[in-house]
Structure formats: C-alpha cells, structure tokens
Image (cartoon, rainbow, N blue to C red):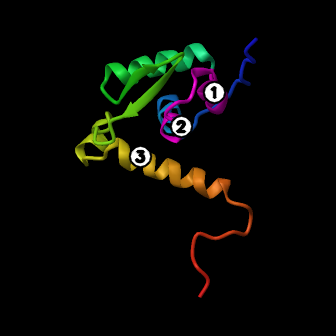
Amino acid sequence: MTEVPEPHNGWTFLTNHARVLAAIADNQQARVRDIAARCRLTERAVQKIIADLEQAGYLSHVRQGRGNTYRIDPNRILRHPTEAGQGLTVASLLSLLIQDEDHRARPAGESTHASG
C-alpha cells in the first residue's frame, strides 16, 4: 500500500512540475513511486505531470524491462513568457535545483570552497 503524502498548505516557489523534473534529473531510472515520495505527491499526480512534460517535449522515456529510463531535453526553453523571453532553458533551472540539492546533502560545516 502506498502512503499518501502529507498535504501542504500555502504557496511554494517551485511547481510540482519543476520538482518532478528535478527528481528525474537526479535519477533517470526512478520509479513513479520513488518520485512521488521524494516530491510528496501521489503517484497519480506524478503520472499526470510526467505525461504533461512528455507532451510538451521536455521529457521522453524508453521502456527498459519493467521500468522506464527518462531523458530530459536540457535545451528546451521554459514555458512562462518571462523566462522564455530571456531564453532560460531547462538546464539552467535544473542547475539551480541540483546545486541546492548538493548543498543540502553535504554534512554541516563542509564547504564547497577550498580553504586558503
């Protein structure tokens, strides 16, 4: 049985589409169940988001055995007119999100800069 994520009240800076895309960027063989748990969404919501991203050309998948391997088009321009007008790509968004994930994954006190 799949555990239903806790609901979130209020607004957030990132959309669920961005969260799912970042989760897939982190693990291109991730199962829908794992993406849902990481993003605190239902599996059904993640399936819909993946379908949206594929339909818009941001994501594709290849079936491998019982799972999928996803491929993100990093050169795809973001959809909102503000970002699209600046030519911001999926790669630029993911670089910010992945950089943040790397920062949070480091032990407290560990720096990204060399001591000198």
Number of residues whose C-alpha sits closer than 10 Å to that of mark 2, classed few (under 14), some (14–19) or many (20 or more): some
Q: Secondary structure at mark 1?
A: helix
Q: Mark on residue 34? A: 1
Q: Amino acid at mark 2?
A: Asn
What is the spatial separation of the Cα atoms under label 3 and label 1, in whole angstroms? 21 Å
Quarter holding the N terminus is: top right
Q: Earlier in the sequence, mark 1 or mark 2?
A: 2
Residue 53, image x and y in percent?
Answer: 39, 24
Which sits in the foreground, 91 or 68?
A: 68
Image quadrant holding the C terminus, namely: bottom right
Classified by dominant secondary structure, the portion drawn in magenta counts as helix
- Asked if the stretch drawn in magenta spans residue 92, the answer is no
**Residue drawn at 61 percent across, 31 percent down:** 39
Name which residue lies at 30% across and 26% down: 57
The residue sitting at the front extreme is: 65
Q: Which portion, as a residue range, is magenta?
A: 23-41
Foreground pick, 48 / 15: 48
